[in-house]
Amino acid sequence: MKFANRVESLPPYLFAEIDKKRQAAIARGVDIINMGIGDPDQPTFKHIVDAMHKALDDPSTHNYPPYQGMKEFREGVVKWFEKRFGQKFDADKECVSLIGSKEALHNCIFATIDKGDIALLPDPAYPVYKSSTILSGGKPYVTPLLEKNNWLPDLTKIPSDVAQKANIIMVGYPNNPTGAIAPLEFYDEVIAFAKKYDLIVLSDNAYSELTFDNYVAPSIFQAKGAKDVALEFHSLSKTYNMTGWRVGFAVGNEKVIKALSTVKTNIDSGVFKAIQRAAITAFDTPKEIIQKNISLYKERRDVAIKGLRELGWNIKDPIKGTFYLWLPIPPSFKASTDFASAMLDKCGIVVPPGSGYGEYGEGYFRIALTIDKKRIEEGILRMKKEGLVFAQACSVK
Ligand SMILES: Cc1ncc(COP(=O)(O)O)c(C=O)c1O
């Protein structure tokens, strides 16, 4: 059998690898605490499930959906976007439905990157940006996200000959895996940079609604001139606990929407209409329901941070966005994979090693707050018992 080089050249998909190890540990009878994947543990909100039941009972939802998404869905999107971010979009030309944002990130990179083209990507980052660039025959050029820069890329460090050869720049805040947020001025800078070098900006805003402590995340479209160059991906996955439903949307520059839609039209047949109807209901979710869900994550965040501080981690400010904690591995470990393996083997805790998110993720690991706070407390206890603390010298109470 022969397989395409592009498949052979991909590194193994991080979460699939982690899942294999997790399954093996479960088979050995280990009581696993899974802090690995950002998959909400709470059910989809009831009013959305109810809307789905109703939509399913209507046979008119059972056939192929329109490629770009139902008109009512796109109208629901642009109405939500205007209410949330104060920005207007044309539902027909500047909006498309997505089967979750993961496929769209891939398809949009596929639509914008030719063989040999450079994609300016953050690192560490959601692994799809890099793998889709490689699958498209492009060359990733990574801009490091460093703590000293608040995990924002330093665009002034990108050599101008590289920027000239690049075709896209990818940004994503609130950020997976670092939990960092971006001020609106950052988007101004990105847009100016993109205009200077004729780049398309792809903004991944999957966590826009998952924020804490009264922080409200912006959209890139609140920055002036963004529509000239940008497209933004949104997902219902994390906001409404809908990861399994596979629904999201992109809004932005008409030409980029058209290019993405052209690829999608040729390879998928859209989002199940019943799901689109349920999604329309999701857009009208009362604030209190979302807030209750956020409070749950906030409580877990605070429990985790308190425990980790007691184990010696110097966590200055609690994260303001996403449900991830991004932490340095203890200095006694050389590589993040060694630390992740020790966490699994000694404590039965699954955490992804930072290196899975790129070379600048080395030296870190990520915790997903998608488990009950009691399990987080149990995890902290196991770490303490096994000596998996940040520094031996710290005072562990
Ligand atoms: C940064 C980021 N973007 C996009 C996605 C994809 O989400 P979905 O395909 O469920 O919309 C994820 C999922 O974890 C993510 O972390």
Image (cartoon, rainbow, N blue to C red):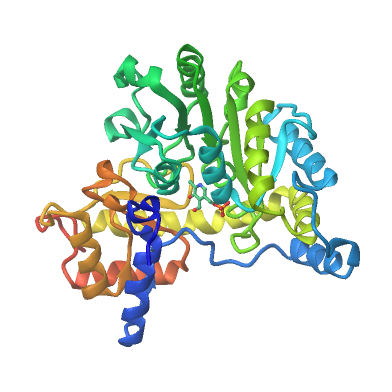
Q: Nearer the viewer, residue 10 or 29?
A: 10
Closer-to-camera residue (281/274): 274
Q: Residue at x 29, y 49 (%)?
A: 327
Height in image: 136 above or below 226?
below
Q: Residue 377 occupies which quadrant of the picture?
A: bottom left
**Picture quadrant where residue 81 is located:** top right
Asked whether, in this view, residue 202 is left or right of residue 301, the answer is: right
Task: In the rendered view, tell whether residue 171 sits above or below residue 366.
Answer: above
The quadrant of the picture occupied by the C terminus is bottom left
Query: Residue 366 or 19: which is nearer the viewer?
Result: 19
Left or right side of 266 for 155: left
| Count of numbered circles on the image | 0
Q: Quadrant of residue 155?
A: top left
- Residue 154: x and y in percent read 34, 24
91, above or below 386, in the image:
above
Q: Position of residue 324 (x, y in %)?
A: 42, 52
Direction from residue 387 to residue 233 in the image, left or right? right
What residue is drawn where x is 31% and y is 60%?
307
In the displayed orientation, state which residue is furthest to the front.
1
- Residue 358: percent from the left, percent from the top? 30, 45
Residue 322 is left or right of residue 60, and the answer is: left
